[in-house]
Image (spheres, helix red, strand yellow):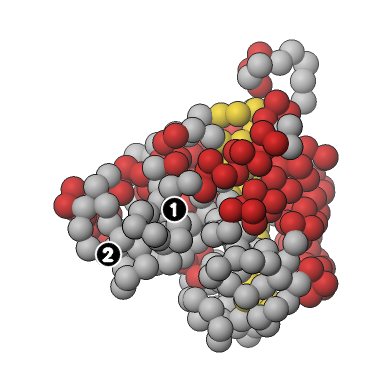
Amino acid sequence: MTLNNRVNAQPLVAVTYGEELARYGFGHGHPFGFDRLGIFWSGMVERGLTARVDVVKPATASREEIERFHSRGYIDQVVQQSIDGEGFLDYGDTPAFPGVYEAAAWVVGSTLDAVRRLMDGRARHVFVPIAGLHHARRHSAGGFCVFNDCGVAIEQLRLRHGVRRIAYVDIDAHHGDGVYYAFDDEPEVFIGDIHEDGRFLYPGTGRADENGTGEAEGTKLNIPLPPGAGDHAFFDAWARVEAHIDDAKPEFVILQCGADGLAGDPLTHLEYTAAAHRRATSRLCELADRHCGGRLLALGGGGYNPRGIADAWCAVVEAMLER
């Protein structure tokens, strides 16, 4: 039964799922494979979660929508390399393949569809698993990320929905540089980012003294953690992020909940359990209820260990359902 068919029901948790999202990935042994969506969904089935959420189909984005964040010249580059299917879109992390433009447009479109569902009340919380591509800059790809759906969503909220105060929280092990530097001078985009110290991990950014520029100084919070940091260190850092976001009184909350901070991820050195993701999601649900009618959009982000992907992302969905 879909949300529209439920009579007198409260808005539900929605999860985006469909083969179009699985098109975003890279082959030939690349860490960001095509199997990540299936791994997550198997975890959902095993935990009996699929019947408790509103499963929605992916949507694609128009070029006009992508241009709200990315430059025309960069989009032209992606279109051309999508036809050729050759080379890299950055300096070696993000390979082109035939249809890469269309695959990335499905990610952006699914995130924008989630924004619309939250803004018109069809859902209270939404999770999009293959999304949260936070490294792409306005003029370039980066770190497995072709288009920055997080950035597009923020621009969409501001330009099309009239939302002024937006909170972006990022718990991916890698610093969300593409979002941070796009909005570091925007005083009404509030950022809280917990990540592995950039001295040890890509992209090498996110120092504690990077807290916004100009009128936006103090609206950003970066908390780098040392390699080997586990749940205790995360919870201590989380208390600071939570207070920062609560003080911001946001009208919309975005959570980039990359699973690569869980112990055993092959690309990082953190040692979280899924309790970190459960805590972050649960507390953001409470803050969203307090400040913005529950509007919380969670985006899957990174994660390259199958068990970590299933455990972290299912914990996010479970925490949403508990609200």
Q: Secondary structure at mark 2?
A: loop
Neighbor class of circle 1 (other Cα within 10 Å; few <14, some 14-19, many 20+) is some
Q: Is residue 318 above or below residue 76?
A: above
Closest to the observer, 70 or 177: 177
Residue 129 at x, y percent in the picture: 56, 45
Name the residue: 64% across, 56% down: 308
Distance between the alpha carbons at the discs numbered 2 and 1: 16 Å
Residue 178 visible in the picture: yes
Residue 269 at x, y percent in the picture: 62, 75
Q: Is residue 218 above or below residue 73?
A: below
Q: Is residue 37 above or below residue 48?
A: below
Residue 289 at x, y percent in the picture: 79, 44
Q: Secondary structure at mark 1?
A: loop
User: Identity of the amino acid at label 1?
Assistant: Gly
Residue 191 visible in the picture: no
Instruction: Pick the quarter of the image with the N terminus.
Output: top right
Residue 81: quarter of image = bottom left
Instruction: Pick the quarter of the image with the C terminus.
Output: top right
From the image, tell me which residue sits under label 2: 88
Q: Is residue 158 left or right of residue 24?
A: right
Q: Is residue 140 left or right of residue 57?
A: left
Residue 168 at x, y percent in the picture: 62, 59
Q: Which label's residue is closer to the chain start, 2 or 1?
A: 1
Residue 11: quarter of image = top right
Name the residue: 77% across, 20% down: 9
Name the residue: 66% across, 21% down: 3
Q: Is residue 280 left or right of residue 92?
A: right
User: Identity of the amino acid at label 2?
Assistant: Phe
Closest to the observer, 7 or 98: 98
Label ID, residue 33 = 1
Name the residue: 49% across, 76% down: 202
